[in-house]
Amino acid sequence: MKNAIIYGLLIGIFSGLWMFIMHWLGYSPQSTKLAPIEYVSVFIPLVVLYFGVRSYRIHDGHGQLGFLEALIQSFKILILGGIITTAAAILYIAEIESGTNLMDFSGRIFGALLVGILFALAVSVLQTNKRNKVD
C-alpha cells in the first residue's frame, strides 16, 4: 500500500500543479473546447502510473507480477491520485476561476476517469510478466 500512496500522491500533486501552471500560461477551463495544452496533462498519470507499477513489481513482487495484481495496484494509485486531483480542481475553481462551477468541469473529470481506466489496463499489460497456467 505504501507504493500506491507514494505514486498516487505524485499523480495528485503533479496534476494539481499542472492546473495552476496552465492558468499561469493563460488557459481558462470555461471554454467548451479542449486547448492543446490540456493534452499534455494526459502524460502525468501515464508516466507516474507506469513507474509506480514498475516499482511495485521490482520491490514488492520481487520481479514477478501477474495481470490482476498489476491492475489492482494501478487502481489503488489512480484512486488516490484522482482524489487529490479532484480536491485541487475544486480549490482551483473556488479560488481562481470563481465564474466556473463544478458542473462545467465535470466533463473533464469524467474524461480523466475513462483515460485512467485505459491507462490502468495498458500499464498492467505492459508490466505483467508472471504467467498463470490454466489447466
Image (cartoon, rainbow, N blue to C red):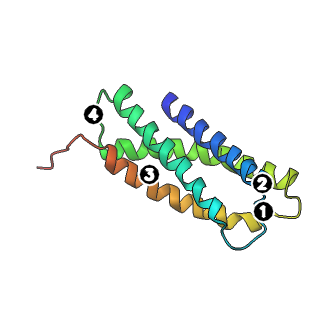
* Residue marked by disc 4: 64
Q: CA distance from mark 1 to mark 3?
A: 29 Å
In the rendered structure, the answer to whether residue 13 lies left or right of residue 129 reads right
Mark 4 residue element: loop
The reply to whether dot 2 and dot 1 touch (C-beta < 8 Å) is yes
Mark closer to the observer (1, 3): 1
Mark 2 residue element: helix
Which numbered dot is residue 120? Answer: 3
Residue type highlighted by circle 2: His
Callout 2 environment at 10 Å: few (<14), some (14 to 19), or many (20+)?
A: some
* Residue marked by disc 2: 23
Task: Relative to 4, say whether 21 is above or below.
Answer: below
Give me the residue at 51% from left, 28% from top.
2
Residue type highlighted by circle 1: Ser
Callout 1 environment at 10 Å: few (<14), some (14 to 19), or many (20+)?
A: some
> For this rendering, which residue is in front, 105 or 27?
27
Callout 4 environment at 10 Å: few (<14), some (14 to 19), or many (20+)?
A: some
Q: CA distance from mark 3 to mark 4?
A: 18 Å
Task: Relative to 71, say whether 63 is above or below.
Answer: above
Residue 45: x and y, percent? 53, 48
The earlier-in-sequence mark between 2 and 1 is: 2
* Residue marked by disc 1: 28
The earlier-in-sequence mark between 1 and 4 is: 1
